[in-house]
Image (cartoon, rainbow, N blue to C red):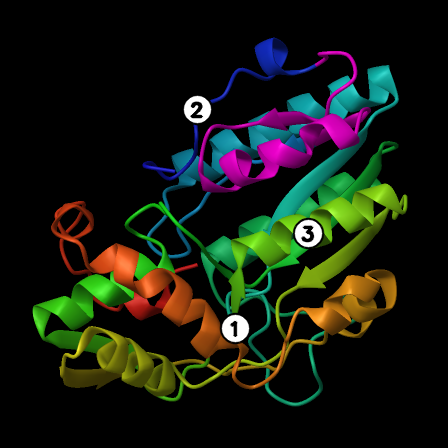
Amino acid sequence: MCSDIERADPARQYGKWGRMEIVGQGFLARNLRPIASAHSGVVVAAAGVSAAGGTSEEAFAREAGLLYELIHRCKEKGHRLVFFSTASTGMYSTPGEPGREDGPVFPATPYGRHKLALEAVLAASAVDYLILRLGHVVGAAQPPHQLLPAMVRQVMSGRVRLFRGARRDLIDIDDVVTIVDRLLATGVNRTVVNVLSGAAPQIDEIIDDIEAILGRSTQRTYTATGGNQQVSTVRLRRLVGDVAGMGFDKDYYRRVLAKYVPSYATPRSLTRGEPEAAACDRQ
């Protein structure tokens, strides 16, 4: 995902018999391809807005247009549509009760409001659908604006800018793919599922671990942040039994960082983009 929204031709990618149709060419799309042969009659909209901050209305409009097109196509074909939303602070921003899929949400950012609006369009349609609100997905070869590569660049530069008191729930892309595979296999339909570990460490703890992995120390500056709402994974754990074996405990994020941080500290990775202000809030 090198731009705010991936360019995709739904007419070209849709309708190949016998395989899950993945619309998009970016990070999520590439990682979902290995399970495509197991899920015919499913269309995955993996070409949406991928930057939580500073996204243009034009990018939002492109994603909305793509989703409307896919809804019409899925209705005609009788296919199920998978849409990726967000479980970040852009969506869940009110401290207190854990954020639930069936509870009220008060998105704090244009990105969160955009995703919630598209969720409503899909829920009001006649198609079968699965909406997945993702945490901060981490994996190899991510776009430079996303959370982990942005944080590694900042640590390597010696200076990081953080949102004070922020928490970020990291989840390995391999675990995301397993969860999607299981949800589709069991026929979960017309529902929203939070997909994240459920254990969100403080952003300072994440930086501490990245520094330890890379043998670096940084100068930290802070800016104000909004509320951090805990996000419920009760529905996820009920629907996907495999979650119990994924190690979603308080040290899960450390294992994810150890797995992927070194690959983002290479010279090639560091030249993919400049350190970004407040990048530690990226989706």
**Residue 64 is a magenta residue:** no
Tell which circle, 3 or 2, labels the residue nearer the N-terminal end.
Answer: 2
Q: Could you say whether the residue bearing mark 3 is in a helix, strand or loop?
A: helix
Q: Could you say whether the residue bearing mark 2 is in a helix, strand or loop?
A: loop
Q: Position of residue 136 (x, y in %)?
A: 49, 62
Magenta stretch: give its range. Answer: 15-43
**What's the residue type where badge 3 is placed?**
Thr
Q: Which of the image's four quarters has the C terminus?
A: bottom left
The quadrant holding residue 202 is bottom left
Tell which circle, 2 or 1, labels the residue nearer the N-terminal end.
Answer: 2
Q: Could you say whether the residue bearing mark 1 is in a helix, strand or loop?
A: loop
Q: Nearer the viewer, mark 2 or mark 1?
A: 1
Say which of 257 and 9 sits in front.
257
Residue at 44% across, 35% down: 26
Q: Nearer the viewer, mark 3 or mark 2?
A: 3
Q: Which mark is residue 178?
A: 3
Residue at 13% across, 54% down: 274
Alpha-carbon distance for marks 3 and 1? Answer: 18 Å
**Position of 44 relative to 177 (above/below):** above
Q: Which mark is residue 204?
A: none
Disc 3 crowd rating (10 Å Cα; few below 14, some 14-19, many 20+) is some
**What's the residue type where badge 2 is placed?**
Arg
Write down the residue under mark 2: 7
Asked if disc 3 and disc 2 are in contact, CB closer than 8 Å, the reply is: no
Disc 2 crowd rating (10 Å Cα; few below 14, some 14-19, many 20+) is some
Say which of 90 and 11 sits in front.
11
Q: Which of the image's four quarters has the N terminus?
A: top left
Left or right placement of residue 121 versus residue 228 in this view = right
Write down the residue under mark 1: 169
